[in-house]
Image: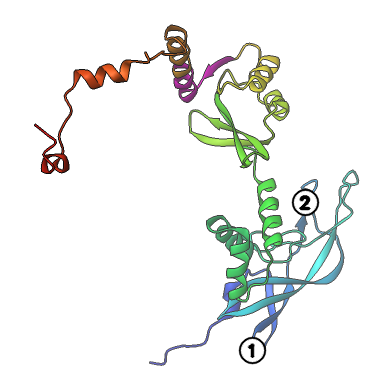
């Protein structure tokens, strides 16, 4: 029985993309493709349009194949939005789950880069990708992560939240983190800790009934202004800190500030206690 050893590359790509030609060098693989979609959804208004405006070639980077950089040259369509009230006149063709609007790499390539960056760092991710013949810079990784973050749906929280500050860079840049007390997961990260951004967030989440916070007056004022009926609770760490501070103040008020030691205290101790004899004095016959 003859075993089939050839690899069908078309099976690794969506059916909407048809491979027309493949060429390669010692370091790169170029795949010429044609898009076969019949319609596309407008990224602005969501209307499905079948009105083709024109064609152009898109160059996209895909995951490396056998250590070689892989580039897709896709002959894609431009569609014209059929909604007269939409601000977008034309938009590029997409393949859901594989190609995005105006992207310069496939979605699976972007997924790999984002996962690697979250496990390492943006610069570390860039160095690893370059060793794999995947061309991307550290700044591009940051932009990719920022774009993915903005596309995420806003996290929802319950009626009880926790608010605290943290340092992006200690003694320089600070932020505010908001955590859902029910799930113990962060729901928002805000810039600054002066309460201004917290006011804006609370104005959009007026279902909050209870807030646990630290002793920062800026947070207290922001909560009182936007949610005057919400209950404000000090968290456990700051309750312990308040207790220790109260004990310290009580001890300082009770104990005298200065403790005076008599001048003859040392001499009285020496007269009361007999002098101990060490080995050197005993050898010289100076001890009784």
The residue at which mark 2 appears reads as 43
Q: Position of residue 172 (x, y in %)?
A: 68, 40
Residue depicted at 77% across the width and 62% down the height: 93
Judge whether 262 appears above or below 53 on screen.
Answer: above
Q: Earlier in the sequence, mark 1 or mark 2?
A: 1
Assess whether residue 239 is covered by the magenta stretch: yes
Q: Give the labeled residue for mark 1.
A: 26
> How far apart in space, not on screen, are marks 1 and 2 (Cα)?
38 Å
Q: Position of residue 281 (x, y in %)?
A: 16, 39
Chief SS of the magenta region:
helix
Q: Start and end of the magenta stretch? A: 231-243
x, y percent for residue 278: 16, 38
Front position among marks 1 and 2: 1
Which residue is most to the front? 285
Residue ranking furthest to the top:
254
Residue at x 48%, y 88% (from the top left corner): 5
Considering the image in quadrants, where does the C terminus appear?
Answer: top left
User: In the image, residue 106 lies at what x, y percent?
Assistant: 67, 66
Eyeballing the image, is 256 above or below 172?
above
Name which quarter of the figure residue 27 lies in.
bottom right
- The answer to which quarter of the image holds residue 115 is bottom right
């Amino acid at each position: 029985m003859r075993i089939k050893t050839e690899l069908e590359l078309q099976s690794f790509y969506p059916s909407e993309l048809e491979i027309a030609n493949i060429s390669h060098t010692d370091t790169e693989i170029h795949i010429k493709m044609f898009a076969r979609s019949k319609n596309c959804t407008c990224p602005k208004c969501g209307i499905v349009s079948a009105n083709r405006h024109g064609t152009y070639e898109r160059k996209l980077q895909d995951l490396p194949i056998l250590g070689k950089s892989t580039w897709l040259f896709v002959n894609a369509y431009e569609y014209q939005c059929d909604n007269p009230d939409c601000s977008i006149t034309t938009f590029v063709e997409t393949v859901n789950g594989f190609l995005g609007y105006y992207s310069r790499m496939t979605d699976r390539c972007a997924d790999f880069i984002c996962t690697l960056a979250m496990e390492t760092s943006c610069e570390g991710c860039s160095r690893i990708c370059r060793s794999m013949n995947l061309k991307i810079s550290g700044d591009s990784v940051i932009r990719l992560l920022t774009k993915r973050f903005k596309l995420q749906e806003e996290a929802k929280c319950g009626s009880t939240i926790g608010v605290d500050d943290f340092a992006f860079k200690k003694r320089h840049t600070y932020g505010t983190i908001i955590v859902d007390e029910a799930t113990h997961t962060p729901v928002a990260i805000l810039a600054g800790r002066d309460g201004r951004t917290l006011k804006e967030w609370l104005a959009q989440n007026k279902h909050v009934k209870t807030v646990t916070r630290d002793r920062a007056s800026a947070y207290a004022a922001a909560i009182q202004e936007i949610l005057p009926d919400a209950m404000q609770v000090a968290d456990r760490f700051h309750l312990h800190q308040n207790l220790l501070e109260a004990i310290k103040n009580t001890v300082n008020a009770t104990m005298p500030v200065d403790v005076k030691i008599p001048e003859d205290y040392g001499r009285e101790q020496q007269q009361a206690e007999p002098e101990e004899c060490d080995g050197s004095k005993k050898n010289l016959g100076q001890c009784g």
